[in-house]
Image (cartoon, helix red, strand yellow):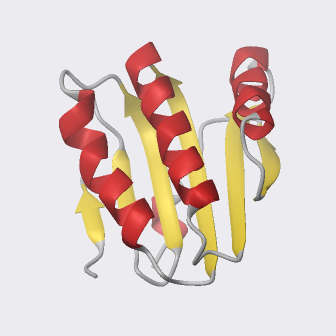
Amino acid sequence: MEAIFIPPESHSPNIEFYPSGKMLIEGRSMPENVFALFNPLLIFATEIATEKVDLDINLEYFNTSTSKKILELLQTLDENEKIKELNVSWHYESDDEDSYEMGEIYEECLKNTNFYYIPHTQVVCLSDRYY
């Protein structure tokens, strides 16, 4: 299994998925073709065989089609029986109630996931701290 690196563009986020279980989705997401962007991630989520996955989601904006694909991605990871510990860190701006509530909606749809809410007072870039 190879890592997935998708650099950010004006309408799509930075994505880093590592076979070690470290994963990042960050930036703004309103791609023209959400299927082309997320299908490799869904395949990765189905095939990953590591026991622990840490996914950071740090989206300052995302559209409805992205929201649906994020839920599908989270559910795919949540249902992957090879993963024994799934940790999702949901980053949001502390004054953005909608983003926080979206995280709560996702969390309610998952059975085997530890969900953490990480407020920020300003937009932060996590990819600088990744591998």
How many labels sit on residues? 0
Residue 85 visible from this viewpoint: yes
The image quadrant where one finds the C terminus is: bottom left
The image quadrant where one finds the N terminus is: bottom left
Residue in the image at 31% along x and 43% along y: 38
Q: Give the left or right position of residue 92, taking residue 53 as reference.
A: right
Asked where in the image residue 122 lies, by quadrant, the reply is: top right
From this view, report whether residue 13 is shown above or below residue 50: above
Q: Give the left or right position of residue 56, taking residue 4 as reference.
A: right
Nearer-the-camera pick, 61 or 20: 20
**Percent coordinates x, y for residue 130 in the rendering:** 49, 72
Residue in the image at 78% along x and 22% along y: 101
Q: Give the left or right position of residue 26, taking residue 37 as reference.
A: right
Nearer-the-camera pick, 81 or 84: 81
Residue in the image at 25% along x and 79% along y: 2
**Percent coordinates x, y for residue 96 in the rendering:** 74, 20
From this view, report whether residue 120 is shown above or below residue 128: above
Residue 9 visible from this viewpoint: no
Asked where in the image residue 108 lies, by quadrant, the reply is: top right
**Percent coordinates x, y for residue 76 in the rendering:** 51, 52
